[in-house]
Structures are given as structure tokens and as C-alpha cells.
């Protein structure tokens, strides 16, 4: 065997090692980093309902046990945890798996919607609904004033929430559904602080209104916001209602509270953009 054989062999081995290193480095750059505590196949309950902004928070999946509630587990941070999971207190009980930030303080800066939305820069008031994020943003001249978690319709027809450009055309403080009832009763489902944004060709109206938020797309096409006073009235929980995002948005659109329960036509209500695709359940 010639003396330079080992040198040439070592050189080839070095080239092969360097080549594999380059490939591995390229893959590391191109492949996304999954920040979830568990792979999607192992995720349970609300942890399996994934939104684009979930990656901004380092979280783990936890199943609530008997006697545990958002208030008991997270104290003054319970609202932020509920908001992150797009869920209300009635649906966050024992046996439900939720996303729990490893540092709950990180939720202080959590905002899934853009702080500035250029298409709204010329609008005094403008509503952006991102179905992928399951969040609604209220904008004033393109700047985000506040944002609210929501539940929309699922991906599939016939309950899918329409996407595109719309406008708020009517407001109704005490609207009642003509199609759906409160679970386990024959009472028409309350649609408090309702804002109509679309009527389709079949004459079906779509509204933004108060309802329960289970943490996943669950409506029949409307856009639902927190309404804890309604849940206290209909279901007896929560004992001390605090969250009423539907009322907040309603009064922001009208510039104050409505004086009665009549249907209020709005000829120049805020524009509404609905974008994205709802997460899978």
C-alpha cells in the first residue's frame, strides 16, 4: 500500500463529513422549530387547537383536575390565560386540557394581531377578524385600540364564517336567535350586543355577538365574543361575571350605550375585514 493512500482516504472522509455537516446545517435553517411542549399528535383538548401566534409563547399542556379553576391556578393572570386559550370559565373545568405558559408573565405582551393595519389607516373605526388566530381587532385610523378572542364557524360548510370585506349595517342590544336554543332548553339563544356584518344571497344574516367561548370554532357562522353576564343568567356560571367583550365592542361601534332594545340601522358602520382559515379542532 502506497504511503499517500491513508492521506487521500482521510481527505475523502473529511470531505464527506464536511458535506454532511453542510446538509444538516441547511436543514436546521430551513426546518421550523417547534416550541410546543408536546408534538401535535400528542396534544389534547384545547392544546390541539393551534393558532399561528401560539409559537410566540413557551407553553405546556395541562389537564385541569377536580377543584381547579383558572382563578385558583393563575390568580390575577386568569384572564390572560383564558384569552390565550380563547376559552371562557364555564368551559375551562376539570378534564379540560389547556395551554399553560411556562412563564405566565409572558402573556402581558401577548398580542396575536398587528398593532398597525395599513388597510385601515383612513378609517375612524375598523374591525379586523383573523379566523386563523380566532381574534378580533378594533382599529382607529389603522392603530389597534383593543383586541378580543372569539369563536367563529368551523372550516366546513354550512357553518363556515364568510371571509372578505363587509360593513357593520345594524346593531341590536338584545337580539335572540330564531334558529338555535340554549343547550338543554327551548329558550331562544341570546345574541346580546349584536352587530350585523353580512346578509348572504339566501337572506341569512351574520352577526358579531355575545355567546359562550369553548376554545375552538363552534358557531354556525357568526362571530362570538365573551358574554359572561349572559352565561350567568342562562347557566348559573360564572358566579361573578367579569368578561363582556361583546358589550365593549358594541359600545365602541355606536360611540356609547344603546338606549333601548330596538334594531338600529347603521348606514355607515365600520368596515370589517375577515381573513384566514379557522384552526382544526
Image (cartoon, rainbow, N blue to C red):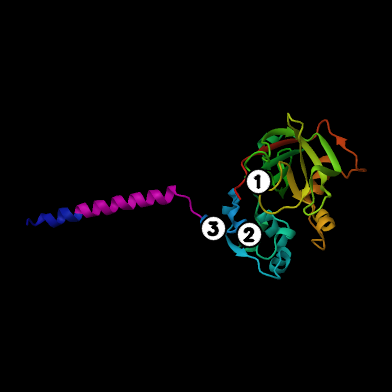
Q: Is residue 206 magenta?
A: no
- Label 1: state its secondary structure: loop
Q: Position of residue 6 (x, y in %)?
A: 14, 57
Q: Which residues are magenta?
A: 11-37
Q: Nearer the viewer, residue 271 or 215?
A: 215
Residue at x-position 68% and y-position 59%: 81
**Label 3 belongs to which residue?**
36
State the count of labels. 3
Q: Which residue is mark 2?
A: 106
Residue behind mark 1:
113
Instruction: Check if residue 20 falls in the magenta segment.
Output: yes
The image shows residue 36 at horizontal and vertical percentages of 54, 58
Residue at (38, 48) in percent of width and height: 26
- Residue 82 shows in this picture: yes
**Element marked by disc 3:** loop
Mark yes or no: residue 255 visible.
Answer: no
In the depicted view, which residue is nearer to us: 95 or 22?
95
Most extreme residue toward the top is 201
Quarter occupied by the N terminus:
bottom left
Task: Name the residue located 70 percent from the left edge and 40 percent from the top edge.
Answer: 128
Say few, some or many: other residues with alpha carbon within 10 Å of mark 1 (under 14 / 14 to 19 / 20 or more): some
Q: Is the residue under label 3 in contact with that under label 2 (CB below 8 Å)?
A: no
Q: Tell me where residue 156 sits by quadrant.
A: top right
Which badge, 2 or 3, is on the more N-terminal residue? 3
Amino acid at each position: 500500500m502506497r504511503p499517500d493512500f491513508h492521506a487521500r482516504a482521510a481527505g475523502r472522509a473529511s470531505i464527506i463529513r464536511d458535506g454532511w455537516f453542510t446538509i444538516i446545517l441547511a436543514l436546521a435553517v430551513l426546518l421550523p422549530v417547534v416550541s410546543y411542549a408536546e408534538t401535535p399528535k400528542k396534544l389534547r383538548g384545547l392544546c390541539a387547537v393551534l393558532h399561528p401566534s401560539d409559537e410566540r409563547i413557551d407553553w405546556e399542556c395541562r389537564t385541569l383536575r377536580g377543584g381547579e379553576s383558572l382563578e385558583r391556578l393563575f390568580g390575577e393572570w386568569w384572564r390572560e390565560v383564558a384569552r390565550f386559550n380563547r376559552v371562557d370559565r364555564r368551559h375551562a373545568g376539570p378534564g379540560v386540557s389547556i395551554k399553560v405558559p411556562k412563564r405566565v408573565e409572558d402573556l402581558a405582551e401577548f398580542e396575536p394581531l398587528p398593532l398597525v393595519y395599513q388597510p385601515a389607516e383612513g378609517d375612524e373605526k375598523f374591525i379586523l377578524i383573523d379566523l386563523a388566530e380566532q381574534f378580533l381587532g378594533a382599529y382607529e385610523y389603522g392603530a389597534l385600540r383593543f383586541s378580543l378572542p372569539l369563536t367563529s364557524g368551523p372550516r366546513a360548510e354550512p357553518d363556515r364564517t364568510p371571509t372578505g370585506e363587509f360593513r357593520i349595517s345594524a346593531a341590536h342590544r338584545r337580539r335572540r336567535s330564531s334558529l338555535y336554543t340554549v343547550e338543554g332548553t327551548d329558550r331562544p339563544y341570546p345574541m346580546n350586543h349584536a352587530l350585523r356584518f353580512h346578509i348572504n344571497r339566501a337572506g341569512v344574516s351574520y352577526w358579531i355577538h355575545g355567546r359562550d367561548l369553548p376554545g375552538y370554532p363552534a358557531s354556525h357562522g357568526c362571530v362570538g365574543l365573551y358574554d359572561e353576564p349572559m352565561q350567568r343568567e342562562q347557566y348559573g356560571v360564572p358566579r361573578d361575571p367579569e368578561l363582556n367583550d361583546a358589550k365593549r365592542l358594541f359600545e365602541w361601534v355606536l360611540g356609547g350605550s344603546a338606549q333601548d332594545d330596538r334594531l338600529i340601522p347603521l348606514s355607515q358602520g365600520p368596515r370589517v375585514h375577515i381573513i384566514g382559515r379557522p384552526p382544526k379542532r
